Image (cartoon, rainbow, N blue to C red):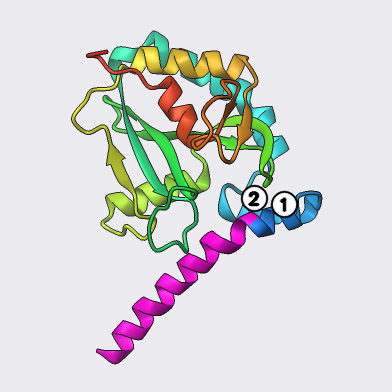
Amino acid sequence: MVLRKFTAFAGKTKSILAVLILPVFILQFNSCSSVQNAIFTSSIDPLEGPALLEKEPSVRAFLENIVHAHQDYSITAFERTGLRSQFRRTRLLTHSFFVIANNNSMEDFTLSFYGSNIALSSEGVWVLNAYADMSSYIMYRNDDNRWDVTEIFQEKTIDTRQTLKNVIARIDKDITWWWRAHISRSRPYRDNCNTALQRTIVFYDD
């Protein structure tokens, strides 16, 4: 029992330290590209930001194809911790992403908005099947919820066609990724993963 309590306390402490230290760490290494790339590839996706930016036109084309065949797809929305080591989601470290499901093949795709660099602000990019999104979702489906994944808007049905058309429109506007966008919402051309989802999602009853 004592060991169990100590392990739980250690896990919570690790999460709290991650939440407190990450902003300072980002600021400290804001100009160090090698450190930024190492954090990016280990915590988001094996591809670095510039490579994901190069892939964004193909992501756009993929979404356009779904828009044309929207009756064959459905979308759900999720939140998870920003870091795998977090104990639970926090206001500053919560990540939002879409899951697009092919209703015929039952294949799932994740879609989310990221910054192309580990920095407080950087060029934004929409990413399909980012490693962190897909792995956290798969673990969630397999009853391993260490990323604290939660489906949001469960009581509503998302309009696949209009939502993805909105995402495509945001891609065309070259939106800047800004870490605190969900706290200061007065900048329409700055988003993070959370505000990007909120500004693009459309429900059938809207």
Instruction: Note whether residue 206 is visible.
Output: yes
Report the span colored magenta.
1-23
Residue drawn at x 50%, y 56% as measured from the top left: 83
Res 36 label = 1
Q: Residue 96, located in which quarter of the rendered image? A: top left
Q: Is residue 142 above or below residue 165?
A: below
| Residue 131 place in picture, x, y as percent | 51, 47
Residue drawn at x 66%, y 58% as measured from the top left: 24
Residue drawn at x 69%, y 28% as measured from the top left: 54
> How many numbered discs, if any?
2
Q: Which secondary structure is most common in the magenta stretch?
A: helix
Instruction: Classify residue 179 as left or right of residue 163.
Output: right
| Image marks 1 and 2: residues in contact by CB distance under 8 Å | yes
Residue tagged 2: 40
Instruction: Classify residue 173 as left or right of residue 95.
Output: right
- Secondary structure of the residue carrying tag 1 is helix
| Residue 50 place in picture, x, y as percent | 72, 36
Distance CA(mark 1)–CA(mark 2)? 6 Å
Q: Amino acid at mark 1?
A: Gln
